[in-house]
Amino acid sequence: MKYIEISGLYKRFGDVNAIENLNLYIEKGDIFGLLGPNGAGKSTTINILCQLLEKDRGSIKICNEELRRSDANIRGKLGIVPQDLAIFEDMTALENTMFFGSLYGLRGKDLKEKALKALEFVGLEDTKKLSKTFSGGMKRRLNIACGIVHNPELLILDEPTVGIDPQSRNHIMKSIKFLNKNGCTIIYTTHYMEEVEAICNNIAIIDKGKVIASGSKESLKSIITDKNKFEVMVNDITEINEKELMDIKGIDSVEFKDNKIIVSIDREINGLNEFILYISSKSIKILDIKSKALTLEDVFLNLTGRKLRD
Ligand SMILES: Nc1ncnc2c1ncn2[C@@H]1O[C@H](COP(=O)(O)OP(=O)(O)OP(=O)(O)O)[C@@H](O)[C@H]1O
């Protein structure tokens, strides 16, 4: 069932077309990844969806009903975890969570119980200190508790893992999967393709305010079946020139990591032969060659000619 359907969405800020004819739909029960580089239009899209920003034009339907401004019914079903932390530094975790719960109409015993449950869920139940003493990861987790306190049926998270430690990141990833298993539809925006690969089932890749590809992870990767990717370990990487490699016919992209070259090669043109000849011509030894799985980063690179994170 189409849960959310966005069609022909436009938003302009002065001279900047932040969103330009954006179309996408999200199924109920999805963990839907909105993946794109900085400035692609992710936050603008979800701010319009959350009614924090007015669209210039276009249609947003939730359960087949056109979203109207200040629709209280929809607001109650939505949980929002904004990119910029929305917590009060001079309040404790419980006070913050209860404050946001009260905005959603929760009161009394029910409010406190739900706030404690949300804090337990993000692993902050025992914290009595003021939020200003929290680490970045703890603040991010509190931000999530404030967004889920009223048990929303749709949770929108805008880059919730920016600048946090790996432990908090893992906690957030696990929490999102758990919420989803319990019936919550999730929209997750990020420019970290690893996160999208790890938790999302359906994805829209957006760039310059438009959806450039959408579908399941597998269907997106099948866009680039004409490429092979290899990881080549060599004894000395210093003599290898990126431009010379890119000049070899059939070589699509090259990346260097320690003493490894990660190279994407056109299947049609047998560039691997030429690549090996080039390496040998420099008297460099190949220690290992592995075939590598394609990633969403490769899909983005293939579609735009740019990296997700430059
Ligand atoms: N309030 C605003 N005023 C002017 N320009 C804006 C405003 N909000 C966004 N923009 C511009 O609109 C474009 C899309 O921005 P948006 O924040 O939606 O991108 P994003 O994909 O969320 O990027 P990021 O990951 O950096 O948050 C950018 O060029 C941005 O500079």
Image: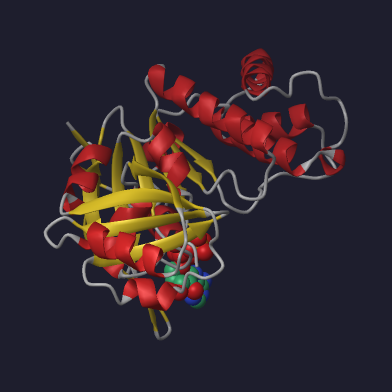
Q: Is 219 left or right of 251, judged from the image as shown?
A: left
Q: Residue furthest left?
A: 268
Q: Is 265 left or right of 154, judged from the image as shown?
A: left
Q: Is residue 167 visible?
A: yes
Q: Residue 281, image x and y in percent?
A: 38, 69
Up-down relation of residue 31 to residue 36 (above or below): above
Q: Residue 220, image x and y in percent?
A: 22, 47
Where on the picture, by quarter, is residue 279?
Answer: bottom left
Say which residue appears at 71% left-offset and 39% top-offset.
137
Where on the picture, by quarter, is residue 126?
Answer: top right
Q: Nearer the viewer, residue 68 or 232?
A: 232
Q: Is residue 9 visible?
A: no
Say which residue appears at 32% left-offset and 41% top-offset.
293
According to the image, what is the colour scheme of the structure? Answer: secondary structure
Say which residue appears at 79% left-offset and 40% top-offset.
135
Q: Is 23 left or right of 97, judged from the image as shown?
A: left
Say which residue appears at 34% left-offset and 73% top-offset.
246
